[in-house]
Amino acid sequence: MLQADVEAGLFAVRIRFAPGTQLPPHKHTGSVYAFTLAGEWSYLEYTDSPPSTAGSYLYEPPGSTHTLKVADHIEGYTDVFFVIHGAMLVLDENGKVAYVLDAASHASEWSEAIRHQGEVVPEIIGGGHVGYAVPS
């Protein structure tokens, strides 16, 4: 987690995925920008699109539904930086919203996971004038 701005409805994350990782189907209420630093990944629904590889930049328009899949043949991690506007709507097997992930929920869950690992929660960029902050 690099940034969580609740007022702006924006969060930025850098995720390192193990080979073969597959996220559940999801869609976003706002735009998403992705920059691949290492590895390879693609969307299962868009087989005609080339995979994202190191140096690739990807724009996801609001409302597109997709399933992120990391290539199985990659050695090491696939490393991606995402800037996400709005919420991520995680879908169940029937296409219904099972879970909503936004700046506030992601910051909270991320902080809990870091503490659960026995680590100190690092400060991240917040935002807004109301004084929302990531719990420490």
Image (cartoon, grey):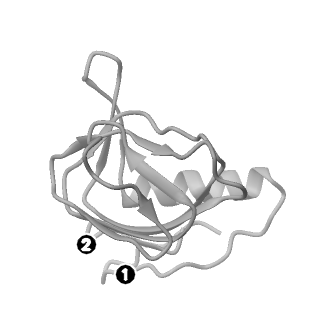
The three-letter code of the residue at mark 2 reads Ala
Location of residue 97 by image quarter: top left
The three-letter code of the residue at mark 1 reads Gly
Q: CA distance from mark 1 to mark 2?
A: 8 Å
User: Which residue bears the numbered disc 2?
Assistant: 8
Judging depth in this view, the residue of 112 and 130 nearest the camera is 112
Is tag 1's residue or tag 2's residue first in the polypeptide sequence? 2
Pick the quarter of the image with the C terminus.
bottom right
Location of residue 16 by image quarter: bottom right
Measured from the top left, where is residue 3 in percent x and y? 46, 75
Q: Give the crowd class for mark 1: few <14, some 14-19, many >=20 residues within 10 Å.
A: some
Q: Give the crowd class for mark 2: few <14, some 14-19, many >=20 residues within 10 Å.
A: few
Q: Which mark is residue 19?
A: none
Q: Residue at x 16, y 58 (%)?
A: 61
Residue 72 relative to residue 44: left or right: right
SS at mark 1? loop
Judging depth in this view, the residue of 130 and 31 nearest the camera is 31
SS at mark 2? loop
Q: Residue at x 27, y 51 (%)?
A: 49
* 111 vs 124: above or below: above
Measured from the top left, where is residue 95 in percent x and y? 25, 23
Judging depth in this view, the residue of 89 and 47 nearest the camera is 47
User: Which residue bears the numbered disc 1?
Assistant: 127
Pick the quarter of the image with the N terminus.
bottom right
Residue lying at the far top of the rendered structure? 94
Q: Residue at x 25, y 58 (%)?
A: 86
Q: Residue at x 45, y 77 (%)?
A: 55
Measured from the top left, where is residue 134 in percent x and y? 53, 69
Location of residue 122 by image quarter: bottom right
Q: Are marks 1 and 2 in contact (CB under 8 Å)?
A: yes
Measured from the top left, where is residue 96 in percent x and y? 25, 23
Tally of marks: 2
